[in-house]
Image: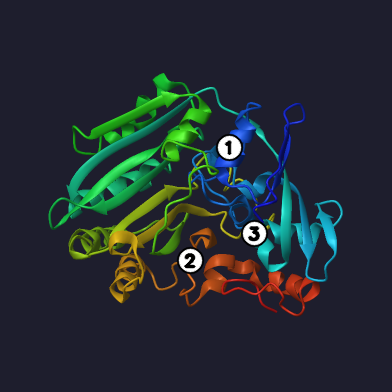
Amino acid sequence: MSKFSTISVNSTRGTAIIETGNRLGDVATALAEKGRAIPHGTCAFVGIGGHAAFGGFGFTSRMWGLTLDTITAVNLVLANGTIKRVTQQNNAELFWGLRGSAPSFGIVTSYEVKSFQAPQYSTIFQYSWNLNFTTAANGISAFQHFVQTNISSQLGAEITLGKGSTNGTVYFTLGGAWYGGPQDLNSVLLPFLHQMPSEPRISLKRGSYIQGVTELAGGSLDTKSVPDSRDTFYAKSLMTPLNSAMSETAIRAFTRYLAVTGFSSKMEWFIQIELYGGKNSAITAVNTDATAFAHRSSLFTMQFYASSPGRRPPFPLSGFSFVDGAVNAITSNSPANWPYGAYINYVDDRLADWQSRYYGGHYERLQALKARYDPHNLFDFPTGITK
């Protein structure tokens, strides 16, 4: 798909046509040249095709929604070889399915999207501490409460957890992006920061919107002249219900696991607790059945990520056990019917109940579409829709 690399931006109409061979760095750069933007993730080398097909979450998503929420038309090749331009007006049911599970139905060649005026400012922030597991648990609980207050949609935030400096500790970072006036960030975060230990390590990078996107990508959006880095990794996800928050017991078991088992692990790992919903979130403002993406009532999207030692293959069995254990520390200390989900863009082909965790109550409806548009299962992959 790398040859499908054209991006056409109409700044007057606020629209763009993005071919699916592009990566997020290419998309952000092309849109920013016309003063426009869409919501998307931070990694420059992620392809827009799958990213938009299965959601597309980033720090602007609380303002603008998911990447797939910007899609107004999908151009694709169906299993029978026909080329279609699918919209809400000409095929509402297929358009519904493509926004949440497009690779199960065809090869998307381009998306037509609505774009947004790029914010005037961005502040990329990090507040970091090395904490014992009890204090880290208290911090997660405080964050969980804070994000359910009336915070602005201009705040995108996450907690990142990593290996601590000593056994029994974790490295705890509040990071993210603020798209309001630079002078307002402190007052927005203060209710949370007042509940954390004093004197964190602080990094604040202020600039334009595209400067912020570049900072979050690690300093460059160039996907052409330098190849992406390689990794041998395993990832899982967990989407926590908005109306059934993580319990204190689950949070404490989770941070204890990371501080003890995580400290002794030979894996290079991190856990991200990404603010997804809460008040004023554009993601949760969309009706659950408006698109095939099933998780409109989640508070956090959590990513559990571990790389092999030196990031070289093979990935060790102990790495799978470590990542599974981190998730289980939460789920096994939650109610038996806790309605959590999983985010398919953090795909896990070892997930036993992926149909319900990824697609929720939409799976049967998607199966009906599969039977109609790909009856011979041409587009077959481990977490794809089957008849």
Q: Nearer the viewer, residue 317 or 239?
A: 317
Which of the two marks, 3 or 1, is nearer to us in this view?
1
Q: Residue furthest top?
A: 183
Percent across and percent down for residue 157 are: 41, 41
Residue type at tag 3: Gly
Dot 3 lies on which element? helix
**In which quadrant is the C terminus drawn?**
bottom right
Residue type at tag 1: Ala
Q: Is residue 363 visible?
A: yes
Q: How many marks?
A: 3
Q: Earlier in the sequence, mark 3 or mark 1?
A: 1
Which of the two marks, 2 or 3, is nearer to us in this view?
3
> Which label was assigned to residue 28?
1
Quadrant in which residue 80 is drawn: bottom right
Measure how far apart labels 3 and 1 are at the Cα level. Answer: 21 Å
287 sits to left or right of 242? right
Instruction: Determine the residue positioned at 72% across, 32% down.
Output: 14
Q: Compared to 131, does 64 lie above or below? A: above
Q: Earlier in the sequence, mark 1 or mark 2?
A: 1
**In which quadrant is the N terminus drawn?**
bottom right
Residue type at tag 2: Pro
Please name the residue that numbered disc 2 is placed on.
339
Dot 1 lies on which element? helix
Percent across and percent down for residue 335 are: 38, 69
Instruction: Determine the residue positioned at 83% across, 58% down.
Output: 84
Quadrant in which residue 271 is drawn: bottom left
Q: Are marks 1 and 2 in contact (CB under 8 Å)?
A: no
> Which label was assigned to residue 100?
3
Q: Nearer the viewer, residue 51 or 229?
A: 229
Q: Earlier in the sequence, mark 2 or mark 3?
A: 3
Measure how far apart labels 1 and 2 are at the Cα level. Answer: 34 Å
